[in-house]
Image (spheres, grey):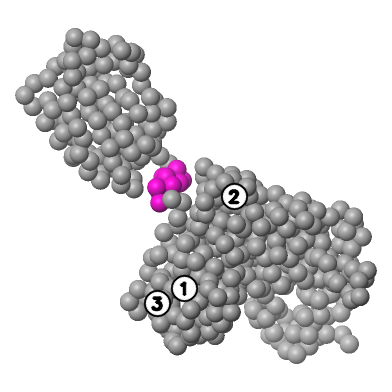
Amino acid sequence: MKFIESELIELKKSTSELKEAIVSMCAMLNQHGKGTIYFGIADNGVVVGQGIGKSTIRDISKAISDHIEPKIFPEITKQKIAGKECIAVNFAGQDQLYAAYGRFYLRMGDEDRKLSVSELRRLVEKKNHYVYSWGTEVSEAPIAKADISTIREFVKRGREAGRIGFAFDSAKNVLKKLNLIKGTRLLNAGYALFCKDNRIEVQAAVFAGKDKITFLDIQSFRGNLFNLIEKSEIYVKEHINWRADLSGSRRIEIPEIPVRALREAIINSLCHRDFTNPKNNEVAIYKDRIEIFNPGQFPYEYSPEDFIKGTEASMPRNPLVAETLFRSEDVEKWGSGLRRIARECKAAKVKVSFTKNKSGFVVTFYRPEETTQKTVEKTVEKTVEKTREKIMGLLAANSRITQKELMDKTGLTRRGIEWNLNKLKTDRVIRRVGPDKGGRWEVKK
């Protein structure tokens, strides 16, 4: 029999290489959950034999017990191979992740590779079936932080959809039935779904061209997930092109990109994001496309096509969030989001792409070329004019309003406020009277 090293077999000349063997065991456990180590066989497959004393097997067992965490219980046996004494160690383990000497390894071919932080995180997610643990952890927020009106509206929508069988009686009882609390505190998922003062943010912007060099409007949305879905959807609907179909008995407004597909992409980007990632969700509207960015990794060993074709089962990254959005009918069916986006776009003859990258996942809707060329200028003008009017109204109502107050009232970033103020001053429709601090704004009639 010819022995060859593989992802499940490691060969060692003797127990002098015991430390290296334990590292290999850890790597195999993390990759396959099992494996075999032979002592007395060189790495080229030549059987050289292993001296076996009274304590040899006990020493191997103790070293494994001392240096692999969580503990495993291998089967260690003497074997005669090619007429020479050898030792075989068969092992298996079903725990989440194994470490050898305090470090983590993964078996790649016949090599043991030390894991980087990002690789370790990926392996943890894989072992957890790609589920982010953040949502099930207890937050610092008490139940009283949850927004009552949002919970009432959620229950109402869920009952109308036939997905909630109970009426609203109290926030605590509703959240308990949704498994979103522990003791007196909200789980992180409950905090994200029903608290307005959480740190989740969506950045939305309209750009003049096909890149991020010149922007026409930038806004930041904050709030609970239901608020963010609504605000993001409204923003996109206000900044895409619409055409009127007058062929029937009544006027029908048709968007250049299916609204249902856009909404689905927005919901997916928030539902499946990595909430521990400091990056924000993004809605970027360019001259030729619209990008919905999600700061969360797509299941590593799968492609978007796997889910578009329906060949893979649902893998919600944040199950508690997904289940809650399903109950309110924001999510129609687990695992069908990408398929629904693709189907809607195909029916409307709109090109859409799904891209996995290092920082997250992007859904890109390509704007129809003929529509874009004819009407994008009008959309740009409308966006700029609307923002100008809002800022000028605020300046007229309070001549000493600060940039921070303008940011709060418009949702624009500081850079967006500065850009618009400079543009209005250049056009001579506003002017600054007095110093930056202590001065006032004057709006020309």
Residue 258 % position (x, y): 76, 62
As helix, strand or loop, the secondary structure at mark 3 comes to helix
Query: Which numbered tag is attached to residue 176?
Result: 3
Along the line of sight, the residue nearer the viewer: 445 or 120: 120
Task: Tell me the residue that label 2 is attached to.
Answer: 310
Residue 16 vertical placement versus 434 (above, below): above
Residue at left offset 8%, top offset 21%? 53
* The quarter of the displayed image where residue 414 is located: bottom right
Q: Amino acid at mark 1?
A: Tyr
Q: Is residue 125 magenta?
A: yes
Residue at left offset 39%, top offset 32%? 107
Residue at left offset 13%, top offset 30%? 59
As helix, strand or loop, the secondary structure at mark 1 comes to helix
Along the line of sight, the residue nearer the viewer: 347 or 221: 347
Task: Report the magenta residues as a range.
Answer: 118-128
Specify the farthest residue to the top: 83
Magenta stretch secondary structure, dominant: helix
Task: Tell me the residue that label 1 is attached to.
Answer: 191
Nearer the camera: disc 2 or disc 1: 2
Q: Amino acid at mark 2?
A: Gly
